[in-house]
Image: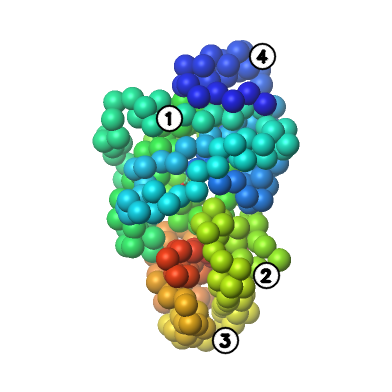
Amino acid sequence: MKIIKSVNQLQKELKKLKKQGKSIGFTPTMGALHNGHLQLVKRMLKENDVGVVSVFVNPTQFNDAKDLKKYPRTLKKDSELLKKAKLDILFAPSEKEVYPKGKKNTLSIDLNGLDTRMEGKFRPGHFEGVCQVVHRLLDIVTPDRLYMGQKDFQQFTIIQQMINNLKLNVKLVVCDIIREKNGLARSSRNERLTKKQRDEAQIINKTLLWLKRNRNKYSVGELKSRALKKLEIPGFKPEYVSIVNGKTLKNIRKMSSHSYVVACVAVWSGEIRLIDNIILKNK
Ligand code: PAF
């Protein structure tokens, strides 16, 4: 596995590979890798001749300076895991490499309101930062396929919108949520949960599964209020339970009026914010 820190060097390397007709897969990450990321990497390596993973904690997507500071940075461990996974190229740039002209975002994309709902309400500016960095990384790597996880449902929906909007020549591949034995979705933030919080956090997946089982039993309003109640356990503070159209991310009123419906939740466990989702129907 090659570890590359400069954009120039990465582009030289990729140019050589593309000349040989090799297809390139790309998985952007902020490091603190876990099994969820490794599943993306596995699929990427299966579907492409060459796999590239970036590890870059993008400052422009954090609306809370404390959260940015606390974000785990574990490059040594990450590179060991990626080497074991037989990755070809690990791209670990500095902020200067990613934003040589400064962090100001000059990208203007019409996201059709997708960025203002759910996470957008609680993390102003977050998705602008995500689009800025993913756009920049795609520009550097120019992959054939981009790999992202379903866990960040709103994120991949917005990135797909950006790809369509800017007519970017890349295929977005969305991979299933990877869960721990107790159902908790794997995420880098989870790493900061105590054992007790981790045990308690199984209520999130249990609530999502309950929503799916009961999607036709109650009205959408009733489903949401019952789910919120289930998540209100000591030490936990649900921020939202949204039941939305899977394409527009708009709240729905009636299950039967939509063919693609997703339930998304955000919950605070102490100081750690967890998000998760489940597809309630897709047909
Ligand atoms: O999902 C993440 O880890 C980040 O938002 C991403 C896509 C790597 C952009 O920084």
Q: Earlier in the sequence, mark 1 or mark 4?
A: 4
Secondary structure under badge 1?
loop
Q: Earlier in the sequence, mark 3 or mark 4?
A: 4
Q: Amino acid at mark 1?
A: Ser
Q: Is residue 198 above or below residue 4?
A: below
- The quadrant holding residue 159 is top left
| Label 3 neighbour load within 10 Å: few <14, some 14-19, many 20+ | few
Q: Earlier in the sequence, mark 4 or mark 2?
A: 4
Q: Earlier in the sequence, mark 2 or mark 1?
A: 1
| Label 4 neighbour load within 10 Å: few <14, some 14-19, many 20+ | few
Kindly identify the residue that appears in the image at 26 percent across and 35 percent down: 104
Q: Earlier in the sequence, mark 3 or mark 1?
A: 1
The residue where tag 2 is placed is: 182
What is the number of the mark on residue 94?
1
The residue where tag 3 is placed is: 217
- The quadrant holding residue 79 is top right
Q: Amino acid at mark 4?
A: Gln
Query: Marks 3 and 4, how far apart in space?
Result: 56 Å
The residue where tag 4 is placed is: 20
